[in-house]
Amino acid sequence: MQQVFEITAPFFSLIFLGTFLSHIKFLDEEKSSFLSKFAFYILMPTMLFANIAKTPNEDAFDFSFLFCYEAATILLILATVSLGAIFKTNLPRSTMIGLNISYPNYGYIGIPMSLIAFGTDAALPLASILLADTVILLTFSSFFIAISDQKKSIIDLFYNLLKRIISQPLLIAVCMGMFFSQLKIEIAPTAGIFIETVSGAAAPVALIALGASITLKFPANQKLELAVISIGKLILHPCLIVMIFFIWPTDKIVWIQTAILCASLPVAANVFVLAGYYGSFKKESANAIVLTTILSTFTVPVTLYFIFNLN
């Protein structure tokens, strides 16, 4: 348990430091937004690239692993859309609930925490999950939103979908890291020091920016949906991953550990951006990100303790 505490305590301490700095007005909304964008577009991609570029090129995508992980993602989205139809919830809203439940916060928490918990061996499964999950989540969410919005043509949908996929900074970093790894390209020492220095700032800046966005005000009419999202994201998603890999096991223990940890993370900040883009469930998504982040300070350490005791 001490190992779990040593990994998680600094992460969540940085999140609450951001909350404290926001509370004393040291960080206002404008500064927090700047830190968040700086971390997402510059620092986190650099850290991801640095770790993937060092991955041995004999490693490759494990498509059976990705199939198992994405099966959980697809099941969660289809389940929420189906339940939404049963309870007469409009399609965009039920789609966004599914996106909240199935989209973990890889960028600000998942990447740095996995690399600290499992070492550089986690870089490739992280890259695989990030790449596949982003494509699947954007594809399914865009598809269901498009069904409900008859104004947009299939060509517009495909164009917007492709543009969002190829412009993702984390995905660009994944592809560049794999390119360097597979071709065994050596990074010049000076460039390597610069990259490592920038990478070192990624986790602290991202977590402080995330913490600065936390508020504790949740409207009464959102409580049921926020409860469903919190249980689905922090408990159901990782449990589903465990069940799937129990049925279809793999001998890559670090890959399974990384998958479970990723699934147990709070809602990704990207969901708020997507909610704004789709024009649905924006305020609720913002509150879901905040609530699941707070609750994850308790659930993630428990999940990590379970992961370390996997045989």
Image (cartoon, rainbow, N blue to C red):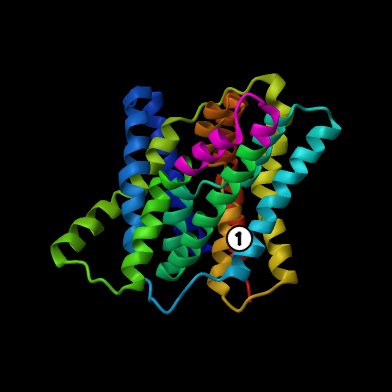
Q: Residue 17 location in percent, x, y?
A: 39, 37
Assess whether residue 161 is covered by the magenta stretch: yes
Q: Is residue 230 left or right of residue 253?
A: right
Tag 1 residue: 260
- The answer to whether residue 54 is seen in the rendering is no
Residue occupying the point 34% across, 42% down: 41
State which quadrant residue 98 falls in: top right
Going by the image, does 244 lie left or right of 255? right
Residue located 68% across and 37% down the image:
144
Q: Is residue 227 magenta?
A: no
Q: In the rendering, at what x and y percent does residue 53 appear? A: 33, 66
Quadrant housing residue 65: bottom right
Outermost residue, right side: 86
Prevalent SS, magenta region: helix
Characterize the local packing of mark 1: few (<14), some (14-19) or many (20 or more) Cα atoms within 10 angstroms.
many
Q: Amino acid type of disc 1?
A: Ile
Q: Which residues are magenta?
A: 144-163
Q: Please identify the quadrant where the N terminus is shown.
A: bottom right
For the image, the number of numbered tags is 1
Circle 1 SS class: helix
Q: Nearer the viewer, residue 166 or 97?
A: 166
Q: Which residue is depicted at the point 60% across and 36% down?
A: 154
Task: Tell me the quarter of the picture where residue 141 sits.
Answer: top right
Residue 241 visible to the viewer:
yes
Residue 117: percent from the left, percent from the top? 46, 63
Asked if 259 appears above or below 144 in the picture, the reply is below
Q: Quadrant where the C terminus lies?
A: bottom right
In the displayed structure, does residue 307 sit left or right of residue 182?
right
- Residue drawn where x is 16% and y is 66% of the image: 188
